[in-house]
């Protein structure tokens, strides 16, 4: 798509794109290039000299059982976060869509958690499940269940998943609700007159109609779980216990800044870069499909 | 998006009981989703003793003013008022900075043919792909090299290097009728005059919608401020809360921490609720 009417000259447009170009080069392309470059070197323990190791960092990375475990952890974490944020959101949106009065009031109330930063969400959930003062962990204790996410892997994972999914419910709800409102009511009514029950109508007609939104949210939520949940993990578990909640992005941070292993951290950045690339391609394949449709 | 295009009741669903059930389910859902925020609010109005002897009360106490003023003026490492100010500067800086550079480059891409235009387009397209979380170590080194650690420019600039806004404005500019540019040219208007008099006013809603999204994006940043603000007086509120937890076995000052959490969510919540329509529009536009 191009404009037919354009202005003449080339100095002005170059001047106009200059600020964005400058910022992108300095804070984006140069660091990204550095990450790729650094991933090919190892620094000695004192940081005095570096040695070229080719793909050695990558070989070391993939033979490291903690890194491989982090891949599995990330996969489990993202799948759980996606399910835990999509299912309640869809359910709420379906109910809200049936309401004539009050639907927008509920929408206003449900938007709140979206504005809450992942790190704050982490603090709120940590407070409820804190082993000493947490309200929910206390009531669980009354019921005879001894909650301790500081020591228990699965409980730690469960807690970071719920805290990460919580804010996303709002986001997904907005998209589902908008999609459901756009479904032509005449089709649904025709089916209703034909005697199709609500859930049959939902699975046979409504769900296929909103499937573009569903797929879009699937991709977006996986991307979110991969890259934007750092705050939740850092506030609640710091990757523990025994790295049980160390997702890939957290590991780039903990190896690079806490462990000071720049070569490995840079190699991890490059691996993540490839992962982001794949996700972007998937997303655009989908966008293309949308444009035709 | 609005509820106005719905047929009269009774067409699709039975009403009465099923209606009440729907409302009941919605209210339950809202209450569950809201509970963590409510609990934080309650905790910010009671004393430390009430929290450390579980279970804590589920209704607000009468220490609201005391806890909030203690948080705002003293905090734990630094007064929360300072952190709020830092967050505000960072969020507004990111939102305005991104909008400004994107408006200019989108205008250039759409209304000019210049050497390197395609290359530039693909270069900024690439920046869509790599969140700051992935390139933290080298970006940190760049910022440190410029001496921008513990500074507002260090907080802001690396986060405006992304192209989402540019694409959004490009898309919008493409929808501006060609006749307007044609008329401007015939009248002998210079390009920047056309930009200021026609393009900017027409983009008002898009700019506002994007501002809402970017403000929240900037306000809620965590990892980046965590890395580059080692001086507590430069902490932002979202990353500063974690710093308020004591290391080791000391008991955290829960009322102050929870008051800070509530303070940290008030500005973005106000922005989202008061500009709900713009916000939803911005979300849908920027993601699709």
Image: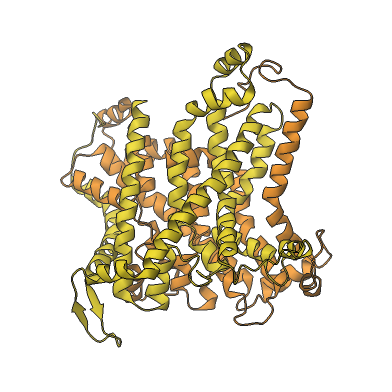
Chain colours: A yellow, B orange
User: From where the camera sits, is residue A151 visible?
Assistant: yes
Q: Residue furthest right?
A: B62
In this view, the residue in front, B228 or A101, is A101
**What residue is drawn where x is 23% and y is 28%?**
A4
Would you say residue B205 is visible in this rendering?
A: no
Q: Position of residue B132 (x, y in %)?
A: 38, 61
Q: How many marks?
A: 0
Question: Between residues A62 and B247, which one lies in front from this camera angle?
Answer: A62
Please state if A30 lies on the left or on the right of B236 as rendered. Answer: left
Q: Could you say which is closer to the camera, residue B85 or residue A213? A: A213
Q: Quadrant of the N terminus of chain B?
A: top right
Residue at x-position 80% and y-position 59%: B58
Question: Which quadrant, please, contains the C terminus of chain B?
Answer: top left
- Residue most toward the front? A144
Q: Left or right: where does residue B225 sit relative to residue B2?
A: left
Q: Is residue B252 left or right of residue A50?
A: right
Quarter of the rendering containing residue A292: top left
Q: Position of residue A262 (x, y in %)?
A: 32, 75
The residue nearer to you, when weighing B137 against B13, is B13
Residue A119 in picture, x, y percent from top left: 56, 62
Q: Residue at x 42, y 64 (%)?
A: A70
**Residue B164 percent coordinates (x, y):** 38, 47
Relative to A80, residue A141 above or below = below
Image: B179 above or below B42? above
Q: Is residue A247 left or right of residue A96?
A: left
């Amino acid at each position: 798509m191009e404009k037919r009417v354009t202005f003449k000259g080339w100095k002005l447009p170059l001047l106009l794109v200059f600020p964005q170009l400058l910022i992108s080069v300095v804070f984006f392309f140069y660091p990204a290039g550095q990450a790729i470059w650094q991933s090919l070197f190892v620094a000695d323990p004192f940081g005095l000299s570096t040695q070229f190791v080719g793909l050695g960092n990558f070989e070391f990375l993939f033979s490291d059982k903690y890194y491989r475990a982090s891949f599995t952890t990330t996969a489990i974490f993202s799948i759980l976060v996606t399910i835990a944020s999509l299912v309640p959101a869809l359910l709420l949106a379906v109910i809200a869509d049936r309401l004539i009065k009050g639907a927008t009031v509920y929408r206003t109330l449900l938007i709140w958690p979206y504005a809450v930063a992942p790190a704050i969400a982490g603090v709120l959930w940590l407070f409820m499940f804190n082993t000493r003062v947490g309200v929910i962990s206390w009531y669980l204790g009354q019921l005879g269940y001894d909650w301790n996410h500081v020591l228990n892997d699965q409980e730690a994972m469960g807690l970071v998943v719920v805290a990460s999914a919580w804010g996303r419910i709002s986001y997904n709800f907005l998209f589902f609700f908008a999609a459901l409102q756009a479904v032509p009511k005449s089709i649904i009514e025709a089916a209703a007159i034909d005697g199709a029950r609500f859930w049959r109508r939902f699975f046979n007609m409504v769900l296929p109609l909103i499937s573009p939104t569903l797929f879009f949210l699937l991709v977006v939520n996986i991307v979110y779980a991969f890259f934007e949940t750092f705050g939740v993990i850092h506030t609640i578990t710091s990757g523990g216990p025994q790295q049980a909640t160390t997702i890939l992005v957290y590991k780039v941070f903990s190896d690079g800044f806490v462990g000071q292993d720049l070569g490995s951290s840079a190699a991890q950045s490059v691996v993540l870069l490839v992962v982001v690339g794949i996700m972007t391609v998937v997303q655009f394949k989908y966008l293309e499909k949308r444009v035709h449709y | 998006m609005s509820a106005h295009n719905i047929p009269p009741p009774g067409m699709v669903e039975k009403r009465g009981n099923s209606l009440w059930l729907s409302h009941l389910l919605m209210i339950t859902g809202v209450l569950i989703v809201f509970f963590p925020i409510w609990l934080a609010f309650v905790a910010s109005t009671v004393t430390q003793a009430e929290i450390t002897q579980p279970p804590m009360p589920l209704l607000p106490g009468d220490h609201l003013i005391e806890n909030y003023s203690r948080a705002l003026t003293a905090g734990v490492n630094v007064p929360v008022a300072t952190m709020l100010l830092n967050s505000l500067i960072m969020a507004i800086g990111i939102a305005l900075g991104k909008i400004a550079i994107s408006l200019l480059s989108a205008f250039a891409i759409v209304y000019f043919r210049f050497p390197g235009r395609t290359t530039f387009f693909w270069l900024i397209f690439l920046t869509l792909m790599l969140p700051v979380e992935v390139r933290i170590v080298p970006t940190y080194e760049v910022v440190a090299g410029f001496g921008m650690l513990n500074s507002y420019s260090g907080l802001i600039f690396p986060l405006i290097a992304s192209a989402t806004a540019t694409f959004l404005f490009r898309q919008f500019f493409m929808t501006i009728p060609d006749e307007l540019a044609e008329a401007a040219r015939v009248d002998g208007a210079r390009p920047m005059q056309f930009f200021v008099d026609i393009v900017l006013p027409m983009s008002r809603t898009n700019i506002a919608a994007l501002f809402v999204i970017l403000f929240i994006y900037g306000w809620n940043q965590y990892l980046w401020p965590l890395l580059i603000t080692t001086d507590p007086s430069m902490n932002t509120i979202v990353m500063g809360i974690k710093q308020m937890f004591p290391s080791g076995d000391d008991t955290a000052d829960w009322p102050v921490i929870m008051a800070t959490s509530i303070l940290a969510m008030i500005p973005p919540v106000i922005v989202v609720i008061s500009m709900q329509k713009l916000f939803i529009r911005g979300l849908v536009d920027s993601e699709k």
